[in-house]
Amino acid sequence: MTACDNPQQDGNDGDSAQGDSELRIGLAYDVGGKGDKSFNDSAFRGLERVKDELGITDGKDFEPKEGEADSDKEERLKLMANEGYDVIISVGFAYAEPLKKVAPQFPDVDFAIIDSRIEDHDNVTSLVFAEEQASFLAGAAAALKSEEDHIGFVGGVKTPLIQKFQAGYEAGAKEITDDIDIEVSYLTQPPDFGGFSDPARGESTAKGQFDKGADVVFHAAGASGNGVLQAAADKEKLFIGVDSDQYESAADDQKQYVVTSALKNIDTAVFDYVKSVQDGKTQSGVQEFDLSDGGVDYATSNREQISDIQDQLDELKQKIIDGDIEVPTKP
């Protein structure tokens, strides 16, 4: 992938364990943890690829606690650094403030954070994505598939990041059907981040949108999205996943309802970052990934659902890449 904000530079002047195939890699999960079939699982795939392809055997992932405070995240990061991890990757914007406090205490450790821009710390690299672009294609897909011109969006927590998904989704849908009805629901508001780890609430919220007439629902809700998918299957309506290809992880009786997923290739970003450290050319600053470099995209695994609209989605995708369509980042 190509970084859009800053060119790849040498980081930390080679003072850390760069170039060493025996790097120790630590991965700290966001709310919901491993097994969310979405955001965190994509990061985990990146860690597994690091082990398989870079010959790094010492890679460990760390789970969050339910309802944890910033102080818990700080302690997790400190623990990893004190235990000798050379590269520490924080999965999610919730780590931003804890990381700003911890990183200066460990100048020889290479830190990365996903989904947050931190530009004033020499040993912190930000891995951020144009989520709104993939969500635009999800919205277009929803509008093309909707028989009622009525669709839904379920966000996990109402934050600026998740509102990027909403903004792109709404814009993509209206590109197809200008007067389409769009239900919008958020499961929780900050500081309650439980909306990313509550499948039961995701299911009930999605069922409410289906009951109002929506026939396609897209979520940006982490593990809560598993409940959204269950609601779609129960109602025999359509579902659009997020971050990972959720057709691949869906149960056999759910797969037919998965139109596509708004992909966010966190696994590739994690792999490329660790490789840059191993090569002694650590990516620095803000590394941004979008449709043009494959950092975000839409899934095409369910051929029965996507084949009839793929040409239209690819045309819209190219227009975004060419700059003919500018996707909003705020609803």
Image (tube, grey):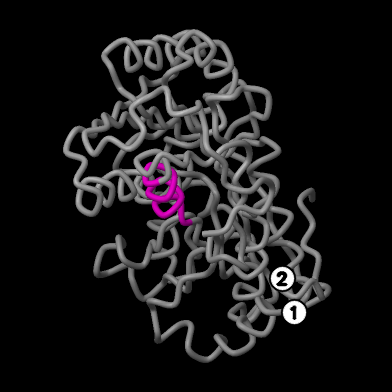
Left or right, 140 with reference to 296: right
Amino acid of disc 1: Ile
Q: In the image, residue 182 lies at what x, y percent? A: 71, 61
The residue most toward the left is 57
Q: Which residue is drawn at 47% across and 74% down?
A: 259
Query: Which residue is pictured at 35% across the width and 50% down the height?
Result: 37
Splitting the image into 4 quarters, where does residue 304 fall? Answer: bottom left
Residue under the point 57% across and 37% down: 284
| Front position in the image: 265 or 163 | 265
| Circle 2: residue type | Ala
State whether residue 204 is above or below residue 159.
Answer: below
Q: Where is residue 278 in the image (x, y as percent from the top left)?
A: 34, 40
The kind of secondary structure the magenta stretch mainly shows is helix
Helix, strand or loop at disc 1?
A: helix
| Residue 267 is covered by the magenta coloring | yes
* Neighbourhood count class around disc 2 (C-alpha, 10 Å): few under 14, some 14–19, many 20 upward: many
In magenta, the rendered stretch is: 265-275
Q: Is mark 2 on a helix, strand or loop?
A: helix
Work out whether 46 lies above or below 325: above
Q: Mark 2 and mark 1 in contact? Answer it, CB < 8 Å.
A: yes
Q: Which disc is residue 176 wearing? A: 1
User: At x 64% / y 29%, what residue is drawn?
Assistant: 118
Q: Does 48 sit left or right of 74 as displayed?
A: left
Alpha-carbon span between mark 2 and mark 1: 5 Å
Q: Mark 2 points at which residue?
A: 173
Q: In this view, does 63 lie above or below 212?
A: above
